[in-house]
Structures are given as C-alpha cells and as structure tokens.
C-alpha cells in the first residue's frame, strides 16, 4: 500500500526528489487530490496514465507555481494574463498553445496545453522545492469518483502508487474550471468548476460561452474532464430535480440519498441513509462535500443512490455537472 506522509519540510524535500527522479506522488490541491509527476518527462507522464488506467487521449493539467513558469510552457496572450492576475493561484485552468518543451503525451498529441497555478499551500511548497512543472490529474482510478482526502486516494490507488501527501480535505471540492484561450478572440469555458463563467466574463469584459462538453468516445480531447461518463460511483446513481418527502419516506434500507439542502419540515423518521450537502443551502459548501458524500455512500454496500440537483447558479452549476456525469452510465433522471 502507498505510504501516507504528513507535509513536513523533510517529507516534502524527500518527495520532491522522488518527483525529480521520475516517480509518482499523490498531492493535495484546493480542488481535488492529484497524482503528480514531472510534466516534462514523457516516461513519468506515462506512469500517471498507467496508474490511473487513463486513456492517452485524455490530456493532463500541468501545475506551475507562477505566471513566469507558465510562460515557459505556453504562449501567453493578453487575455490569459488578465485571468492569471485575477484568479491565480486558484481553481482556474487555462488552455493555451504549447511550447515544444511540453511532451506530446501530456497534451494527447495536441498543440495546446492545459495549465493551472494551484492555491493549496502544500502543493505550492512542493512545486517550489522540486522546481518542476507537475502534471497532476485527479488521483483516482479513471472515470470514478474524484478524491478530496488522502483516505480517498488510498482507497482508490493505494495499491498502484507509492506515496500520498496528506494535506487535509480539499476546500473547493470539485475540479478546476477550464477556459480555452488558445484562440484569444474566441474564449470559451470547456469545464465548469470553482470559477464561474460570469466571473471570467467580467474580467475579460465580454461574454464567454460555456461549451461544457460531454464527449462519449475516444479521440484526443482538448482538455480533461469532458467525457460524458465521469466521476462515477460503482453504485447506480439516479438524479432528481428535487427529492420529495414521499421518496424520503419510501426509500429502502439499501438506498442512499444525497440532498442539496435540509428538507422542510425535516427528515422523516423512516428516512434511509441520507447525506445533506449543505443545511443552509450553500452551493459552495455542497461542492466541497459532494465527492466525499459519494465516496461514503458508494462504500456502504447499497443497491441504489439518489441525488438531488442543486440550483443552476454559481457553484451549483459545477455540482450539477459532476452529478450528471456521475449518473451518465445509467438512465434515470426525473
């Protein structure tokens, strides 16, 4: 099993050397835990794909400590620099034309690279210590629920990777927003996340369409997280615009329910396993707790999961995107 390390200076220095030598380390970020390797070493990048059983057609996000580090990997345009000033470090990934330094395996053979500057203090310390850009997709078996704690990583990849850094629970809880600026005249959001399209539009001073793509099949992708089936529990998941009091009453003991907010007038005494993402109805809190709720219920040996969609605004858009992809392998949205 993987060793779980506390983020002491000695441990981070040792794991920075592991990364510099081509090894794998699961790392905390503010969004979800990532499986990191040297982004400039093709063999190290391929090790990520093998450990996750991830198709080579799905590109990696490259993590950097600064705008200057990003400029060594991609051609920055004025729009990208605007967004970097506004949102970096933070949960925003920017797709740009890549420089030759970036290996093709990290970009699914395409001409663009997805770059992010993370805000998590442990990840930032690690980036400074190893002095390398780190490719770090979510640290879970491909297609399954993203990890937001070190324990989630251990449960999913503990037998396939050697090292996990425990940086606590992720405070954003869903993957970064991805904005494509490879054509600066036509910016577009490819994946919703911790930064909204409205926030991006305000900085750029123009509307930014959301092309929140849902790709069914193979072929190189421009960015990660676009597949229709993704973030999926092994237990069948059914979505509801609203979970009714009647469903709460009649749910069987082998059914789990995820509510966006606390129901009014409250849970019936007969309710089965129920997780409430935010008792006060906060979409940001719901996003932070979503994957942990799915992990917990998915390990409970249940027959069926039900989840309630969030209001389609702000962070609720990202919550609903993850739920829809998590449920895509099964019919059942009512």
Image (spheres, rainbow, N blue to C red):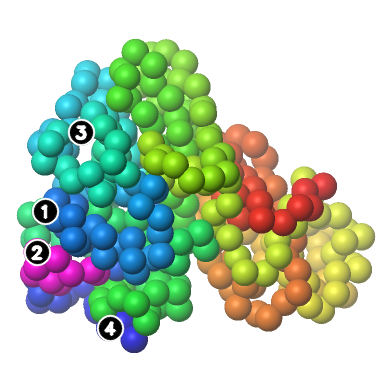
- For residue 334, side relative to residue 225 (left or right): right
Which numbered mark, 2 or 4, is in the foreground of this view? 2
- Mark closer to the chain start, 2 or 4: 4
- Mark closer to the chain start, 3 or 1: 3
- Mark closer to the chain start, 3 or 2: 2
- Mark closer to the chain start, 4 or 3: 4
Q: Which residue is mark 2?
A: 20
Q: Secondary structure at mark 1?
A: loop
Q: Secondary structure at mark 2?
A: helix
User: Can residue 89 be seen at all in this image of the molecule?
Assistant: no
- Residue at (76% x, 53% y) in the render: 331
Which label is found at residue 132? 1
Q: Is residue 151 above or below residue 187?
A: below
Which label is found at residue 98? 3
Residue 57 x/y as whole percent: 39, 47
Q: Which span of residues is magenta-colored?
A: 15-25
Query: How many residues crowd around disc 1 within 10 Å: few (fewer than 14), some, or many (20 or more)?
Result: many
- Residue at (32% x, 25% y) in the render: 181
- For residue 55, side relative to residue 264 (left or right): left
Q: CA distance from mark 4 to mark 1?
A: 22 Å
């Amino acid at each position: 099993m993987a060793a779980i390390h506390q983020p002491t200076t000695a441990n981070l220095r040792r794991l920075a050397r592991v990364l510099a030598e081509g090894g794998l380390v699961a790392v905390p970020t503010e969004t979800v835990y990532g499986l990191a390797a040297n982004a400039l070493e093709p063999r190290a990048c391929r090790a990520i794909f093998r450990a996750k059983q991830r198709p080579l057609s799905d590109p990696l996000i490259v993590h950097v400590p600064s705008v200057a580090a990003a400029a060594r990997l991609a051609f920055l345009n004025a729009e990208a620099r605007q967004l970097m000033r506004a949102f970096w470090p933070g949960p925003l990934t920017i797709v740009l034309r890549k420089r030759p330094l970036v290996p093709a395996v990290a970009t699914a053979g395409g001409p663009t690279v997805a770059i992010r500057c993370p805000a998590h203090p442990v990840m930032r310390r690690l980036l400074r210590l190893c002095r390398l850009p780190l490719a770090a997709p979510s640290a879970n078996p491909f297609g399954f629920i993203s990890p937001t704690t070190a324990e989630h990583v251990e449960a999913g990849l503990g037998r396939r990777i050697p090292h996990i850094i425990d940086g606590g629970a992720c405070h954003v809880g869903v993957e970064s927003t991805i904005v494509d600026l490879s054509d600066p005249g036509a910016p577009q959001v490819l994946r919703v996340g911790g930064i909204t399209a409205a926030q991006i539009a305000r900085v750029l001073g123009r509307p930014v369409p959301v092309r929140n793509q849902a790709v069914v099949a193979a072929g190189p992708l421009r960015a990660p997280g676009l597949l229709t089936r993704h973030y999926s529990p092994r237990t069948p998941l059914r979505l509801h615009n609203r979970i009714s009091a009647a469903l709460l009453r009649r749910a069987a003991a082998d059914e789990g329910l995820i509510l966006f907010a606390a129901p009014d007038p409250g849970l019936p005494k007969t309710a089965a396993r129920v997780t409430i993402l935010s008792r006060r109805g906060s979409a940001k809190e719901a996003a932070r707790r979503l994957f942990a709720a799915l992990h917990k219920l998915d390990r409970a040996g249940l027959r069926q999961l039900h989840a309630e969609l969030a209001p389609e605004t702000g962070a609720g858009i990202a919550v609903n995107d993850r739920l829809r992809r998590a449920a895509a392998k099964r019919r059942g949205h009512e």
